[in-house]
Amino acid sequence: MSVQNFPPIYSTVVEIFQWLKSVYKNISFPEKGSCLSSGRSLAPRGRRSCSSIGCIVSVPFGSHNNVWSTGRDPAIWEADTDAVYAALSHHLWSTFTAPEAKSSNEDLKEMLESNKESLKLEAMKRVVGLIAKGKNASELFPAVVKNVASKNIELKKLVYVYLVRYAEEQQDLALLSISTFQRALKEPNQFIRASALRVLSSIRVSIIVPIMMLAIKEASADMSPYVRKTAAHAIQKLYSLDPDQKEQLIEVIEKLLKDKSTLVAGSVVVAFDEVCPDRIDLIHKNYRKLCNLLVDVEEWGQVVIISMLTRYARTQFTSPWKEDNEKAFYESEEEKKDQTEATPYTMDPDHRLLLRNTKPLLQSRNTAVVMSVAQLYWHLAPKHEVNIVTKSLVRLLRSHREVQYIVLQNIATMSIQRKGMFEPFMKSFYVRSTDATHIKTLKLEILTNLANEANISTILREFQTYVKSQDKAFAAATIQAIGRCATDISEVTDTCLSGLVLLLSNRDETVVAESVVVIKKLLQTQPTQHSDIIKHMAKLFDNISVSMARASILWLMGEYCERVPKIAPDVLRKMAKTFTAEEDIVKLQTVNLAAKLYLTNSKQTKLLTQYILNLGKYDQSYDIRDRTRFVRQLIVPNEKSGALNKYARRILLAPKPAPMLESAFKDRDRFQLGTLSHSINSKATGYQELSDWPAVAPDQSVRNVEVVEPSSSESEEQSSDESDETSSDSGKSSSGSEKSSSESEPEQKKKTKTKKAPQKKSKAAAAVTAPSFGPVKTHELLHHMTGKGLSAKYHFPRQPCLYQPSMVAVQVILANSSDHSLEKIHIGDRSPAGLNIHCFNTIERLEPEASVTVSMGIDFSDSTQAANFQLCTKEDQFSVSIQPVVGELLMPSTMSEQDFSKEQGGSFAGRTVSSGALVLVSLELKESSALLTINTEKSVMASMLLRDLKQALALA
């Protein structure tokens, strides 16, 4: 077979295989009629399979013999060698002509339209992967939207992810499935309900605004906090689509602001800031709740809430920075009496509540949260308390350069007003060689702000190193910083000036040019003392090529030409030779120099001045021509000049104020720290300015909320210490005889009659009793002898579990009574099967005689069955068990009187922790006995609770 018989593309294929054959000696071409593998390896068992590269298969060295694979095209099966070459050429050619994405999308369409759920799920995973990579998958919308009604939950979730992305682009197709989305809002799965609402709010069509509004209202009352959170997000989308719905949306926001779930708090505050940021009356009743929930809210919700509370506090509290220490020299006795009666500034308790609850967030792992708390303290805290944010801000400098940039910008603003905050951490702002230029510049800015008489010598030594940097922009910024230090601290002005003069002989033109500019500004402060420096700069003029530096030297020559009368004319003579080749800024200063010398030394410079003015008259730049025309009329007397010529000397040679070398961050404090406007030093779209402190604090009673607080007797508090020392088995406490409990009923009747007497007088005044918390008992989980030095005790804190609402919170105290450290303390296997336990994080090391308290969450499923699990260390495993008491499986629930019979004397309402089943306990007092009734759907729990209550009443 000859290669010349094939077209060029086939020739290329033949050459490829000839090369492969020469490299891999063990590869042989198949004979005519031999079977060709279609995408499958024919390797012997135990060998590695071939990996496909395009339409050719790569064969590992020496792994396969007589293996030939040409892709997955069935058209080239069982073909001869000539057909192989032709098929391979077709594959190669299609690779160049047909996009891979197109064929991939066709495959995905087929998979999405198949009848197998597994293929659909695999296809959706690939589609979501394409979206994650930023590729366009919009043409798959019709095939994807067909699966929105699938019964497979995982598939449904992925379909909704896709629809959220493309619903706005494919509005017409999305509208066809709107009824499916509405049905999905009633799904039992909370994630499906939330996803359906998210897709519905992503369809930007005004015709479905009423449907969206109805869906948001229903979702805001959903039992799942995740769905309510999604409803808060949908509020912003609906408001941007139809602002006329603002009033109805405010009602939903007001409702969601009262939500006690930490999952909802951040999202609803975002909606509040977007829809009605001026309605602070909505925040009054929820202010304290938001402050208390702040620590438990997710990180990005914390950022939004802190920002909103900062603006709120600036309108509701008086300034903590104001101190009225000024007294009048003459004052009457009545005024003195008034002053003695006047109380000094005391911080509002709600103001202090905000500062106290945000302080722990300075330890957050999220840099945005730390930055938010820092700006809150900067704008709200008393000046002596602001320093607590310093360490946290310095800690953030170890993060990525993007984070460093924002943090350093804020520190630069803060260091201008309060140098003492960051002076102890000055070394943290030393520049590193690995820092980016913008980070170096900001650190340089901060070091300059921190400079004072005490540390200036250290800072200048640091600056000497920075000037030698290979980063030219940074070296130039360092020279400017030296100039600022010389201006701010008069003690080092001469030292800095001498150092800058030495830099004039530097090989780097950028350093020399920046030194000239800074020296020019410094000389304006005291020119009489430094005429030698001006002469030295004139000598270096020919060696300087940077236009700004040359212009600065010319300005100095013109401004102080009377102090260097012999040098200035010579500099003008040199400039006359090179005038036409100079930059515009240099030409302008040359014209100014000529004008000033014409007025002070016209004998030597008259002809030079006329020559330069003639050159400027015909210059290409209209700025030069305009300046030349103005100067000629000003200094050269003629008939048209008039009285202006008399004042030429006063105009051109007037003393000029020395320039102020100030920080670029001096005026940035007008923006709130941590905002985009502060970063770009310009008011950004959507920026909300902080209001000034009110002169008189508004009424603080608007934040008062009536809350039914749990009551407990002093005797119960005193007995809690004693009960902690004893360890009781829950089985024994629940096994009381009915006889003994019945005998205690008369005693209980006497006790309760005195308490319930007012309720008997007026049935209308009878109310549900507030929940009463008994003493917390500590139980032994693991004895130190059994645990080889590791002991564990547990108790129920009777607080909502943070990990999951259906779980019971358990606190475990682990102690090491051995003489060696215990490592890797964690929870191992658990029983019964399916037991849901939120384990505590692994304790890496517990030192001898040390103890630690950890929190767990256990879902007992409204059962008193013990939770068995293994408490493990690095070396051992110990089987332990937590036996719940029935009362610990209940949480208090407030109910109205209408839910109980009017004849009942006392009542208690609660719900089970896991399923939320209602548990009603009522106590009816009769003449000689008391009737205790428990109503609940949990029959086993009711019987056990009845026995426990009888025993407790007997002991009361």
Image (cartoon, rainbow, N blue to C red):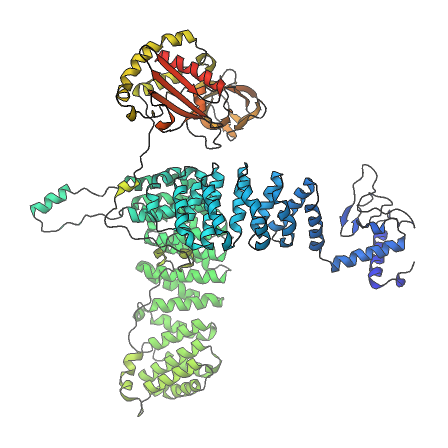
Give percent across and percent down for residue 348. 27, 41
Residue located at (33% from left, 59% from top): 492
Q: How many marks?
A: 0
Give percent across and percent down for residue 891. 42, 26
Of all residues, the one furthest to the left in this rendering is: 333
Image: 341 above or below 938 = below
The quarter of the picture where residue 887 lies is: top left
> Is 889 in front, or is 830?
889
Q: If the image is split into quadrants, where does the N terminus sit?
A: bottom right
Give percent across and percent down for residue 464. 43, 58
In the image, taking residue 503 as reference, residue 788 lies left or right, namely right
Image: 366 above or below 764 = below
Residue located at (70% from left, 55% from top): 102
Residue 129: in sight, yes or no? yes
The quarter of the picture where residue 658 lies is: bottom left
Residue located at (39% from left, 84% from top): 628
Give percent across and percent down for residue 419. 34, 51
In the image, taking residue 192 as reference, residue 411 lies left or right, namely left
> Is 798 in front, or is 209?
209
> Is 386 in front, or is 74?
74
Residue 424: in sight, yes or no? no
In the image, taking residue 797 as reference, residue 63 lies left or right, namely right
Residue located at (28% from left, 26% from top): 765
Of all residues, the one furthest to the bottom in this rendering is: 639
> Is 377 in front, or is 101?
101
Q: If the image is split into quadrants, where does the C terminus sit?
A: top left
